[in-house]
Structure formats: structure tokens, C-alpha cells
Amino acid sequence: MDGRARAARGGGATRVAGARLMSSGLPARQWNSGDVVSLPVDVDAARRWYCEHVVPWGLVVPVELDFAPGDYLFTKRCMGLTPASCSSFEPPAGVCFREAKPSDLDAYAALDARVFGSPIEPLRSWIGGSFGTPGWTHWLAEVEGGPIGMLRAQRTDLDGGPCGTITGVGVAESHRRRGIGAALTSRACAVLFDSGATGTDMVATTSRPMGGCRVPVARPSHPSSALRGRMARVARRTSTACQAAAPAVTAGCAKRQ
């Protein structure tokens, strides 16, 4: 869905043998990746597609598959929840949650950049591609009207069935260790489950648990085969250069645990 939402901005989505591919159209490999779903994988077809989009890229591979066409980068944890395993946490006094409006894009992007230490561009372009788009909800935590926390929720009905995904959970450093991240995550999960999602996965976006906040609402679990395949992720990336059409762009691969 990320790639399709950005089709007008140079992004896109497609399938090749063994993998689903998406591109944001932005020059950052974390926003251009494919998910391996079976073997064999047509890596050459994937490389050609990403070279056409002139972006660096990677593949995400379940660790149970014996497939490593690139250089190992890192292991990325992913936690799964079902409605029955989702706990509810109330925000601390004085903290309010709400769904972001299109007019909140600049404030949301500025907070995300501050929390995760990223440059505002191309981060704003990445966030803006799905901001206010059906299927995505961007949440804000506020104190006295000022944003101090955020997360991105995505609702899909694709290969895995009715699912939700939580990413980019972050809280400003001055407000951490108060349970804000956990409460915001539980609120977003409840909305996803109310919309019909039968499972939700949460992806840690930095080396700190869930972007600097402890999130006890997210406990590792194996509720279904769809969620088992998304529990934890290992990223790999090949060092093979693209063809002459895009000589500066490296091809990539990624693996999930």
C-alpha cells in the first residue's frame, strides 16, 4: 500500500516470482523494499524494477528460508498481537490523544525528526505520502495542545487477511517513561481491531524499544501463520550495482526472523 499511495510521486508496487516489491520513489533504502514470500525469488527481475525507479533497495526474508542473496545488515524485531492479547493503557493525566489532520503534517514530521534524529527531508516526503490517505491513521499525543508523541497505523486486507500495522511509535525525550507510548499504541490497536483487523504487528523503528518508549502492550506471540511470518525481521542488502541505466543505485535484499 505504501508504494501504491506514492505512485503519483514516483513510487509504485509490483510482484515478481517469490516476492512483493514496493518503492516510495525516495532515495532511501528503508523506504524501498520487497517482501520475500516464497522460493525461488527472481532477484534479477526485482533489480530491474528498482533500477527503473532509480532507488536503493532491499529485500525482507523470513529467517526460516535458506535464502541470502545479499550482505547481512541487521535483525529487526516485530511483535504480533491478537485482539484477545491486547491490553488497554490509559494516558497519564494531561496527555490527550487524537488522530492527526492533514494540516498537522508539518508538526508531525518535525516531531518525528526530533524523536528519531532524522533530517526533516526526505522524512516529510515519506510521511506525506500516506498522511490523510485511506488505510492510514497518524496519531498524535499532545500536552496543552502541543505534540509530544506520535505513531502511524495502517489497516490492510491483502495477502495476510484483515491486519493492522503499527510503526513509528515515538515520544519526545522530555515526556518518556510515563507510559505514553504504551497508551498511544493500545489506543491505535483498539481502533484497528474495532475496524475488523484480526491481528496487528508492531515494528521497532530504531534500536531503542519502539522508538524510545517501552510498550508492554506489545508482547511477542504466535497467534497465526500470518503473524508468525512477521514476528522479527532480518535485513540484508546486496552490494551488486544496477545496470548502466542507474549505475549509482545498489540493489538490495532483506531477511526476516
Image: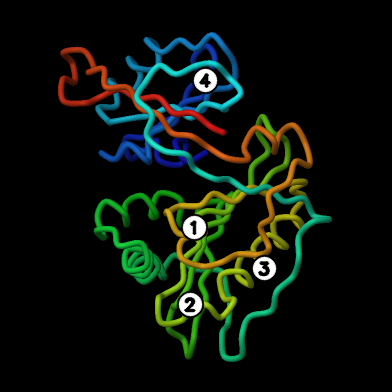
| Residue at position x 37%, y 40% in the image | 30
| Spatial CA span between label 3 and label 4 | 32 Å
What residue sits right under mark 2 in the picture?
176
Q: Note whether 241 is above or below 108 in the view shown.
A: above
In this rendering, would 64 be left or right of 105?
right
What's the mark number on residue 19? 4
What's the mark number on residue 132? 1
Specify which label sits upstream in the sequence, 3 or 1.
1
| Spatial CA span between label 2 and label 4 | 38 Å
What residue sits right under mark 3 in the picture?
187
Q: Residue 11's quadrant in the figure?
A: top left
Q: Identify the element where label 2 is drawn.
A: loop
| Residue at position x 60%, y 49% in the image | 165
Labels 2, 4: front one: 2
Labels 3, 2: front one: 2
The three-letter amino acid code for the residue at tag 2 is Arg
Q: Identify the element where label 4 is drawn.
A: strand
Specify which label sits upstream in the sequence, 2 or 1.
1
Q: Identify the element where label 1 is drawn.
A: loop
The three-letter amino acid code for the residue at tag 3 is Arg
Specify which label sits upstream in the sequence, 3 or 4.
4
Crowding at label 2, few (<14), some or many (≥20) Cα neighbours within 10 Å? some
| Residue at position x 52%, y 76% in the image | 141
| Residue at position x 79%, y 56% in the image | 85
Q: Identify the element where label 3 is drawn.
A: helix
Crowding at label 4, few (<14), some or many (≥20) Cα neighbours within 10 Å? many
Specify which label sits upstream in the sequence, 4 or 1.
4
